[in-house]
Image (cartoon, grey):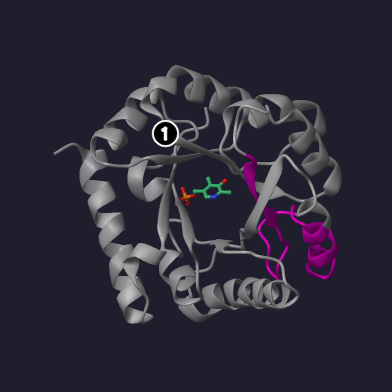
Amino acid sequence: MSAIASNLQAVRARISKAAKDAGRSPDSIQLLAVSKTWPLSCILEAVTAGQRAFGENYVQEGTDKAIAAVHQKLDWHFIGPLQSNKTRPIAERFDWVHSIERLKIAERLSAQRPAYLPPLQVCVQVNVSGEASKSGCAPAEALALCQAISRLPGLRLRGLMAIPEPSDDFLAQCAPFRQLREIYKHLRATGLPLDTLSMGMSHDLEAAVAEGATIVRIGTAIFGERNYA
Ligand SMILES: *Cc1c(COP(=O)(O)O)cnc(C)c1O
């Protein structure tokens, strides 16, 4: 078995255990393999091991891979910061965007989504307490942003995403995930048909699953340490 295949097996086992510990079905959590910086050959190894959904952070790199692997019919998720002058290749080549933080980007993606494709599935990134970066909308802005996005014809709003500051402490990891889930519950209570909480990475997926994650975004634990050089 390749290293990537055995890493995938180990990550799936972690998700299953975390789900059982939380009294949840493992099937309610989707594994997104974050393949940024890794060549297509690594993605294809993961595909051989049964992985279908891949996350990318950079427009050019992600688009190149999605085009190169087009016959594999994989699911491509854009999870990185998105500038408004770079939305078109994402609208044309990706299935999901997790990192929407302002309406202008959403409007461009909607307008640029080709009519022959289903609506682009999107999550709004929220800057919960202890956010690792400055990205994401403020929690108090999430409702208005989601309501506006839900009216865009080229998009299908699925849920919320967050990237909290790394912590080694389980309870400290849980707190921002719980905050995101509370916002999610509030938005659903207003009638928005959300079904996705995109949260949890290699070091904190157990805490994210405990707090209700439906998509975990895992890079290092599958592909190894990234080298940005
Ligand atoms: C890189 C990245 C990940 C994966 O992080 P790992 O720690 O390697 O699992 C997940 N989400 C986002 C938004 C990322 O940029």
Ligand 1 lies under 8 Å from the Cβ of mark 1: no
Category of crowding for the residue at label 1, using alpha-carbon neighbours closer than 10 angstroms: few (below 14), some (14–19), many (at least 20): some
Image location of residue 38, percent across then percent down: 42, 30
**What is the secondary structure assignment of the residue under circle 1?**
loop
* Quadrant, the N terminus: top left
**Location of residue 204 with respect to 75 vertically, above or below:** below
Q: Which residue is mark 1?
A: 74
- Name the amino acid, label 1: Leu
What residue is at 80 percent from the left and 35 percent from the top? 108
Question: x%, y% of residue 169?
Answer: 48, 76
- Magenta segment: 119-147
Q: Residue furthest front?
A: 116
In this rendered view, identify the residue nearer to me: 192 or 124.
192
Residue 120 is covered by the magenta coloring: yes
Residue placed at 52% from the left, 27% from the top? 229
Q: Residue at 45% x, 76% y: name it.
A: 210
Describe residue 178's horizontal placement relative to residue 7 as left or right.
Answer: right
